[in-house]
Amino acid sequence: MGSLDAYIARALSLSVQTVRKILKQDKPKPYIRTRKRGGILSPFEDYIRQRLPAVGYCAQAIYEEVVDRGYEGSHDTVKRFVKPLRKKAHTEATVRFETPPGKQGQVDWGQQWTVIARKRARVHLFAMTLGYSRRIFAEGTYEERLPVFLRCHEKAFDHFCGVPHEIIYDNPKTVVLSRDFEGRRINWNPTFWDFATYYEFRPWPHRPYRARTKGKVESTIRYIKRFLRGKSFDSLEHLNDCLMSWIVNVADQRIHGTTHRKPAEMFEEEKDLLISHRGKPPFKVQQRAVRHVARDCMVTFETNRYSVPARFVGEEVEVQAWDSRVLIFHDGTLIVTHPRCEGKYHTQINKEHYNSISYGDDLPVVSLVSADYGPLLEQEVEVRDLGFYEALVEQGDAL
């Protein structure tokens, strides 16, 4: 019969040395994990915790987002990580915030991979949800730039035949350039602020990491994604036609899970309380660009060229387009106004901008010519013998 330590080792499937080491201890020692093993999901855990409230703790939505960020693991791994966080969030007490008819709308972007013209494409989904009726508008685009963002707003206003009195947003740069956490100091995107003022609604960016503030539109994004999954389209226009047909015939006619009524029916109580935008022409986005004034006293904007006084050569200026005019600013001061060129590769020149240029007594009067844009100034050309120019070159002078 073997020794006691050998018997214990066989019974516990341990080595004899391990058993003897433990038996020599005066008291049991707690297990201390010296090294934390990093799983395949570890680099994405902070991002997932931040994004979960925004996507309603949907593991599938989170999985799609982390895959776009380089995650190579399985959906089940993401689902196991999300499950306890979702359970904890759903056990926390919350108060649902409802708004009266016509008062509030909520806007957000979502992204969805789909097939367009037999190619896999990532579509950006603009969505607006009315807070009272839950009626929705959605538009698929290829980008989220400010002109596209504002155009989608106007299509939503046309769809609803009115404008909500206030609209809740996340904090994208197309809405907010910077802000403090509490929202007491907000630096609005100036073009967006002009747009909101034009249509007379109050924008309201929610606090960071408080996606539940616009939970209605978050639910709308998930709802739209479920409609798009597994479908293919001939073009982006085809996608939007199908999306609008689905909104009108399905989304607006369903019994909503929270209100237990059809959005289309509730909208009848809301439509007359929206801000009317009838008769207003579409908002024209002011275009801006920063340029350096070239040596020929010109700046290029939208492929066309505009003259600037010679004293600003080499300086940085801001070019703004307002309807039929182009305005050029230096250090915030308006220095030039030109008619806006129609088409491409044209010029607008004010001869007075070149008055301060001195040519010297011994130099010929030349005309400024651009090979691409034609004559810039019409001036007389003094004809001289070629020997005159050769002499200047020999003396080190340059024209």
Image: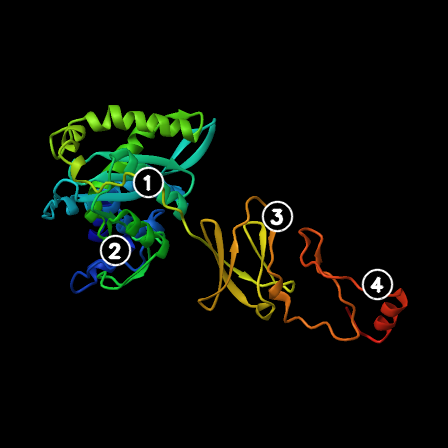
Q: Nearer the viewer, mark 4 or mark 2?
A: 4
- Mark 3 surroundings: few (<14), some (14-19) or many (≥20) residues within 10 A: some
- Mark 2 surroundings: few (<14), some (14-19) or many (≥20) residues within 10 A: some
Write down the quadrant of residue 116 in the picture.
Answer: top left
Q: Amino acid type of disc 2?
A: Pro
Q: Where does label 2 land, which residue?
A: 208
User: What mark, if any, has residue 383 been given in the picture?
Assistant: 4
SS at badge 4: loop
| Horizontal and vertical percent position of residue 398 | 78, 70
- Total number of numbered discs in the rendering: 4
Q: Nearer the viewer, mark 2 or mark 1?
A: 1
Q: Where does label 1 land, which residue?
A: 154
| Horizontal and vertical percent position of residue 185 | 26, 64
Q: Nearer the viewer, mark 4 or mark 3?
A: 4
Q: Residue furthest front?
A: 380
Q: Is residue 115 above or below residue 175?
A: above
SS at badge 2: loop
Between residues 375 and 271, which one lies in front from this camera angle? 375
Q: Nearer the viewer, mark 4 or mark 1?
A: 4
Residue drawn at the location 56% of the way across and 44% of the way down: 343
Q: Nearer the viewer, mark 3 or mark 2?
A: 3
Q: Is residue 275 above or below residue 287?
A: above
Q: Is residue 19 left or right of residue 382?
A: left
Q: Is residue 79 visible?
A: yes
Q: Amino acid type of disc 1?
A: Glu
Between residues 169 and 101, which one lies in front from this camera angle? 101
Q: CA distance from mark 4 to mark 3?
A: 30 Å
Q: Is residue 382 above or below residue 59?
A: below
User: What mark, if any, has residue 345 been given in the picture?
Assistant: 3
Q: CA distance from mark 3 to mark 1?
A: 31 Å
